[in-house]
Image (cartoon, rainbow, N blue to C red):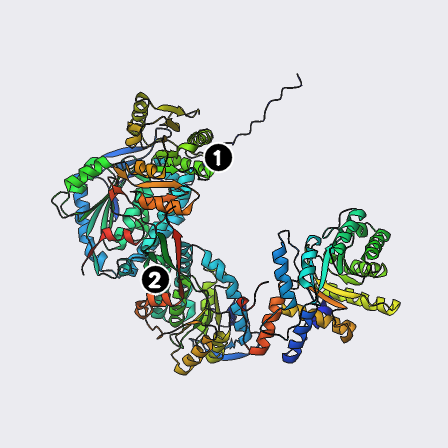
Amino acid sequence: MEERAAQLGKRSIKTTAKQQGIRLAISMLDLTTLEGADTAGKVRHLCAKAVCPAPTMPEIPSVAAVCVYPALVSVAREALHGTGVRTASVAAGFPAGQVSLEAKLADTEDALAAGAEEIDMVISREAFLAGDDARVQREIAAVKERCGEARLKVILETAELGSYDHVRHASMLAMEAGADFIKTSTGKAGAGATPGVCLVMLEAIRDYAERSGRIVGFKAAGGISSARAALHRLVLVKETLGDEWLTADRLRIGASSVLNDLLMQYARTKTGRYGRPEDFSRE
Amino acid sequence: MSSSRLEVRKTHKLWIGGAFVRSESGRYDRAPTADGRTVNVPRASRKDVRDALAAARQAAAPWAARTAYNRGQILYRAAEALEARGEGLDVGRQELAASVDVLLHYAGWTDKLQPVLGGVNPVAAPFLSFSLPEPTGVVGVVAPDAPPLLGLVAELAPVLAAGNVAVAVLSESDPVPGLDLAEVLAVSDLPAGVVNLLSGRRVELSMALAAHRDLNAIVDAAGDRELAGELDRLAAETIKRVRHGRCAETYEQAVADALERLEAVSELKTAWHPVGA
Amino acid sequence: MSAGTRTSLVWDYAPAPEAVDHLRLRDRYGLFLDGEFRDPVEGRYLPTINPASEEPIAEVGWAGPADVALAVERARAAQPAWAALPGLERGKFLFRIARLIQERARELAVVETLDGGKPLRESRDVDIPLAAAHFFHYAGWADKLRHGVQAREVAPLGVVGQIVPWNFPLLMAAWKLAPALACGNTAILKPAPTTPLTALLLAEICQEAELPPGVVAILPGDGNAGAALVRAPGVDKIAFTGSTAVGREIQAALAGRRVGLTLELGGKSANIVFEDAALDQAVEGIVNGIFFNQGHVCCAGSRLLIQESVREEVVDRLWRRMGRLRVGDPLDKNTDVGAINSAAQLQRIEALVAAGEAEGARRRTIACELPERGYWFAPTLFTEVSPAHRIAVEEIFGPVVSVLSFRTQAEAIEKANNSRYGLAAGIWTDKGAKAFEVARALQAGVVWQNTYNHFDPTAAFGGYKESGFGREGGPAGLRPYLRIVR
C-alpha cells in the first residue's frame, strides 16, 4: 500500500503543470481554523484570505471553503457572503465524538442554523472499534437527515482505526450511510492523510462508485503542510480515479499552513526565485 | 606490517541541517587531496542551496536566542575540536593553527559585541533609549579558493559570533578541507543547521544563494569582480546586506577587521522606554 | 477513636546530602608562589575549619611579610614576558582556567561549601559557574583590549595585589584575577583567612593550565599579610573587596603613593517595594536579597523599604515565607540558609541584633532547630525600625532584615539614598516607567528591577560613596587594570 503510494509521489511535476496543479490545489482547499483560541477577528482574516489568497497574483483562485467550529459559523458566513467560498463547520462532538447522539445532533443543528453549508462530522470510533457497525451508520444517517441540502463530510479519523482494512471498512460504512464526502482525519490526533490511507480511501470510493453509481467525494486532512504533499495527493486522485475527480465538488484538502507554501511555490514558478515566509501574509 | 591492507576511503558529502548528504542532483566534481590523489566531491545544486537555506532558517531563531556566553562556549569547543582533529584536514600546521586561533578570537567576541557596538542614547526627552546589535539572521558565505580552510573559517567565525547561521559555498578548486571541517564542527555542540557547507561551482551556487529571497546577507571573499557585481544585482531584489572582502591568508588578516566583519552581519535595534510617571 | 480526629500528613524532605567522597583534597597546602606550592618562610600552618561542624578540613600555610616580598619580586620578574605575549596567547591561558574550573566544578562547589558554610545549592549553581564564566569572558578580552576602552592605546599597570573576602571566595578570586591577567598584569592574591581552600585549588588549576611561574601567586593569610601586600613597594595597584573599615585603612595607607586602587566595600542596600509591585514575587525577591548566602553579601538588600499602603501585607507574607526557610547542613541540597562563616562573624551579628532590640525595634526570628555544633543564626526580621537605629544604618552582614516604610516615591528615594553606602538597590513595581525613573534617582552602583542578586561577567558591578569605587565586570572591569598610553 505504502510502496504504491510512495511510487506515485515520484511523479515530477514541472512548470506549467506545476502552476496548474497549484491553482487546482488551492481551489480545493478547505481553509481551516480549529483552535480553542479562535475569535471572530481571526476568522474574518481567514475568510479574507480564503476569498483572495494573493492580491498580487489575481489568477490565484479562491479556496473551496472555510472550516470553523460551530460557534464561529455565523461570522464566517457573513464574511463569505456572495463570494462563492462555502462555509463549512465541524460538528457532532468534534473531534473525539464521545458524546450522546442527542448532543451530536444538537451540535449539528446549531451549525446549520448559523448558516453552515457543509458539515464535517466524526464517526463514533468507540462504536466502530466495538464492532457496532449499525450504530456507526445510524449516527451518520441521523446527521445526514438533519443536513438536508447541506453537504455531509464524514471523518473516519484513520489514525485511530488501526489498520488499512479498517479504513476501507469504515469508508464503506460511511458511504453506504449517506456521506457526501469521506474525510481522513480531524487533524487533532496522530497521523493524518498519509499517502497510504489516501490510496485506500480513494480505492474504496472508486469501488463504491462502480457498485452503486453514486459519487462520494474525498477530503484529505491532517499532515498536509507542504505544496509537495498537496500535489502528491492530487496525483493519487488523478491516478486512482481520473482527471474528472480533480474538482472541488469531489476533492478537498483540509489544511491551514499549506496555503502559503502553495503560494510561495507558485510565485517561484513565475519569478524563478525561492520565496520566504514574509512574502505572503499569514492570515 | 599491514602493507597489504586496503584502506577504507572516505566519501565526501555535503553538510546540510547537521546531516551528511549527497547532492540531490547526484552530480560530482573531481578535487585534489593533500596526498596527491583525486577524489569525487558532490557538486551541489540550487536545490541543495534551497534545502540548506531551509535548514539554516529553522536553526536561526534558536541560535540567536541562546546566550552570548553559550555561543562563545560552542565556538570555543569548535576550536578545541579543530585543534584535536585538525591533522586529518591535511592543510599544513600553519594554516591549521591560524584557523584554530581565528575560532578562538571570535569565540571571545560573542559577549562583547553588544557593549562595543551598542549603548544608551542620551535622548532629549524623558526616555531610556538604548541601541543594541542583533544578528541579521541567515548569511550566505562565499569562501575563496585559497587558503581552503583558513579562508572559510575566517568568513564563518564572525558570522557565527554575531549570532547568525550560515550557508557556505566552499573553495571550488580545493573543497576537501572545507568538507572535512564539517566533521570537526559536527562534534562541537553546534546545533544542526547553524552551519551548512556546500561544495560545487562557485558561480552557480553563490548566485542561487543571492537569488533566494529567504537570505538576509551575503559575505563574499571570492575576489571575483564580475561575480561580485552579479551578487550585488541579485541581492538588491530583497535588499540583502552584502560585504565583499579580501580573503584572509593569515590569522592577522582574519582578525584585523574583526569589528567590520561583525558589523556587516548585525542589525541595530533602538528601543525607547518612558521614564517617569 | 472519635470521628473528628485525623492525624494530618507530615511530608518532609529526607536529607539529601551531597557526596564528598569524590574530593581530592590534600591534608596540607603550602603557599602558591612562582608556580609551585612551598612552605611559608616562617613555617606557619593553621587549620581551616568547616563552620557548620567546627571540624578542621585541611592545614594551610599562612603568608608572612617575607613571603609577600618574595611573591612581589617574582611577580615583577614575570610581568614583562607575560605582557609581551600576544593577547590571544594570554587569553588561551585564561580559557584553559575557565574550562578546568568547569571540569572540576562539583569538587570546587563542595569545597567552597565545606570551607565557608554556604549552601551547596548556591556554590554549585551560582559561585562556581559564575567563576568559570568570568574567566571565559575576560579570556576573550585579552586580544581585544582596545575595543574595550574606546580605541585608546593602553598598557598594563604591572604587578597587582588583590585581597578578597570570605563570602564568595572563588568567585571573588575570579573577579580579581581574570581581568588583571587579561590586561597583562601579574597578580598576587590574598584569600581571606577563613576561606583559603578554593583559592588553593585554583592554584592547582593554574599549574595544570601551565600558567607561567610568577604570573599568579596565592598567599593565604590574615590582615598582616594583607597589610604587607598593600605596603609592598613593588606593587602598582591594589584591589580590595571587604569591609568599609578596612577599605578606609588601605586608602589611607596608600596616601601619597602612586598606586592604583579599587575598592568594593560594604553596603546597606535598600530593597524598595512599591504598592503596585507583584507582591508574591517581591517577597521572593526580598528573601533572595537578604537570606541568599546567609546575608553575607555586600549588596544584600538589608533595608526593606515598603510603601505604607502594603506594609502590613508584605511583612505578613514575608514572615510566613521566612518560616519555610530551611537552616542547616550546608551540604544538604535542600538547605536554604547555611552556617555563619566564623565565630567572630556570629558574634558581630548577635551584637548588632541585640543592639536592635535594645534600641526598641521589634525582633522576630524564625523557629527552627539549629545544629549543636557550628555557627548558626536563624533568619530574623526587625519591624518598628527607625532610620536612625543602628540596625538600619550599619551593615550586619547576616540573615537579618530591617523593615522601614515610606509614603511617596520621593520619600523612598530620599530614604534609600540617605546612607553613607551606595552599593545596590532593588525596585519592585509593575510600572516600567516608574522603575526607570527611580533607578535614575538612586545613588547605587547596581539597581535591580523586579529581581535581586543577579550577577554576570558582562555587567559591571561596584558602588557609589563609601561602598567603594571601581567596577568589576564588562569592559568597565578592564579600566582599573590598564593605563592609557595615548
Q: Nearer the viewer, residue B158 or A59?
A: A59
Which quadrant does the N terminus of chain A fall into?
bottom right
Residue C183 is situated, as x and y percent measured from the top left of the image, at 25, 55
Instruction: Identify whether C456 is placed above or below A67.
Output: above
Q: Nearer the viewer, mark 1 or mark 2?
A: 2
Number of numbered discs: 2
Q: Is residue C256 left or right of residue B230?
A: left
For the residues beneath circles 1 and 2, the answer to whether they share a chain is: no
Q: Secondary structure at mark 2?
A: helix
Q: Residues within 10 Å of mark 2 (few under 14, many from 20)?
A: many
Q: Nearer the viewer, residue C7 or C65?
A: C7
Q: Which residue is mark 1?
A: C16
**Tag 1 subunit:** C
- Residue extending furthest toward the top: C1
Q: Residues within 10 Å of mark 1 (few under 14, many from 20)?
A: few
The answer to whether any part of residue A91 appears in the image is yes
Q: Which residue is mark 2?
A: B105
Which quadrant does the C terminus of chain A fall into?
bottom right
Q: Secondary structure at mark 1?
A: loop
Residue C115 is situated, as x and y percent measured from the top left of the image, at 34, 36
The answer to whether any part of residue C24 appears in the image is no
Instruction: Identify whether A156 is placed above or below C231.
Output: below
Q: Is residue B243 left or right of residue A204?
A: left
**Tag 2 subunit:** B
Amino acid at the residue labelled 2: His
Q: Is residue C3 left or right of residue C24?
A: right
Measure how far apart labels 1 and 2 are at the Cα level: 42 Å
Amino acid at the residue labelled 1: Ala
Residue A19 is situated, as x and y percent measured from the top left of the image, at 64, 76
Instruction: Identify whether C390 is placed above or below A176.
Output: above
